[in-house]
Image (tube, coloured by chain):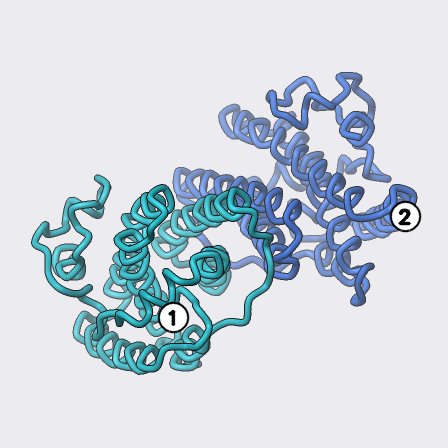
Chain colours: A blue, B cyan
Amino acid sequence: MGREILDGSPYLSRLALHPLNTLISAMPAPSIKFLQSATSNAWIEQAIANLDIVLLDHSHCERKAAGVALNLMFRYPSRTRLVRQLTTIAQEELAHFDQVNQWLEHKGIPLAPLAAAPYGAGLRAEIRPQEPDRLLDSLLVAALIEARSHERLGLLGDHCPDRDLAKFYRSLMASEARHYGAYWVLATHYYDRQLVDDRLASLAQVEKQLLANLYPQPRIHS
Amino acid sequence: MGREILDGSPYLSRLALHPLNTLISAMPAPSIKFLQSATSNAWIEQAIANLDIVLLDHSHCERKAAGVALNLMFRYPSRTRLVRQLTTIAQEELAHFDQVNQWLEHKGIPLAPLAAAPYGAGLRAEIRPQEPDRLLDSLLVAALIEARSHERLGLLGDHCPDRDLAKFYRSLMASEARHYGAYWVLATHYYDRQLVDDRLASLAQVEKQLLANLYPQPRIHS
């Protein structure tokens, strides 16, 4: 499974060794498998012109990602595999959160709230409220957000003019790839594979639409 | 500060070396400073007679403790000191959660929901909804819960007949002590010391009352 879900990543050569990665193909391709659209040049230009705000938004993203994992652990306390995998993910997100906050401190950027782009709420609105749909959708929405984060941190790693910061972005990418892989694997553990594929394709279409028009304020998911 | 808040712990000799602990007095005393009552023998007997349920409840407690820290980080995203300290606490709680879950697996106890004792809700009801009271109360309620956890894990470490499990309980105690110290230090960072002391005494009185009658089901905070 890991092989095909990560086939599309152009960043595979950078992935650190990890149990999940033993399943990963080394064949590069132009886009990340889960995603139905590649990020536009307009986003890259907007992000590079607003690196401080993007860094602050990145801090919020990491905290939110930890929150998503923890919320699922609260909602499904008896699902052993989910609890175990999401514990690891939440720990990694918190470690990244701390690292991003150290970058903010290093650059003299104070912590501050930021209005969210419509992306997250738009995807969450697709989560059907009844089980068993709710868990499936929750896992796949999380997978899509992680996949997009993986793509965009890669772009920041490629285009950021601050070499150290670029290196930092690249260092986070292996985790993001593991995370979207882990959410997908959990979905296929609890649900029929065809059901997962169909729903993922449908949600990925929404994800693509949500990014069709660049959000005027620079964000990781603008 | 660390000196006086931890003066009362009978477990000081076991505390691992840690920056906060350099402030800790080594003088033992009969109770933990924050707490206005010592745990009854009835609780110890109930817990030792129901170690499996207590272990499962402990898992829930660690996840909830991580959730408390993360929720405060969401509510006060601009408070740098709070965010930094609670990131560490949330990471440690998640690590403990994972360790407790490994113990559950080792003992063949499946993850499962457990009805909560009235303790947590009773303390949360004391959190005044308006700022600046809300943050002060949130920090002090968290401090009290951590202080009580510290005391009770110590009792489990002393009385648990399974030597390895007893050792595990003792291994967690240093963290619990750091956590209640950290919450208290945050309170004194943001609020006047006298205000903190007065409110802590008042909340500790409620905490004592909540434990005055043993909850019929065995829990860490029954």
Q: Which mark is residue B138?
A: 1
Residue in the image at 86% along x and 39% along y = A36
Residue type highlighted by circle 1: Ser
The chain ID associated with circle 1 is B
Q: Residues at marks 2 and 1, common chain?
A: no
Helix, strand or loop for disc 1:
helix
**Alpha-carbon span between mark 2 and mark 1:** 43 Å
Residue in the image at 66% along x and 52% along y = A79
Does residue B182 appear to the left or right of A97 in the view shown? Answer: left
The spot of residue B20 in percent (x, y) is 22, 47
Kindly report which numbered mark, 2 or 1, lies closer to the viewer in this rendering.
2
**According to the image, label 2 marks what residue?**
A195
**Other-residue count near label 2 (Cα within 10 Å), few / some / many at <14 / 14–19 / ≥20:** few
Does residue B52 appear to the left or right of B113 in the view shown? Answer: left
Does residue B128 appear to the left or right of A12 in the view shown? Answer: left
Residue in the image at 61% along x and 24% along y = A18
Q: Which mark is residue A212?
A: none
Looking at the figure, which quarter contains the C terminus of chain B?
Answer: bottom left
Nearer to us in this view, A197 or B46:
B46
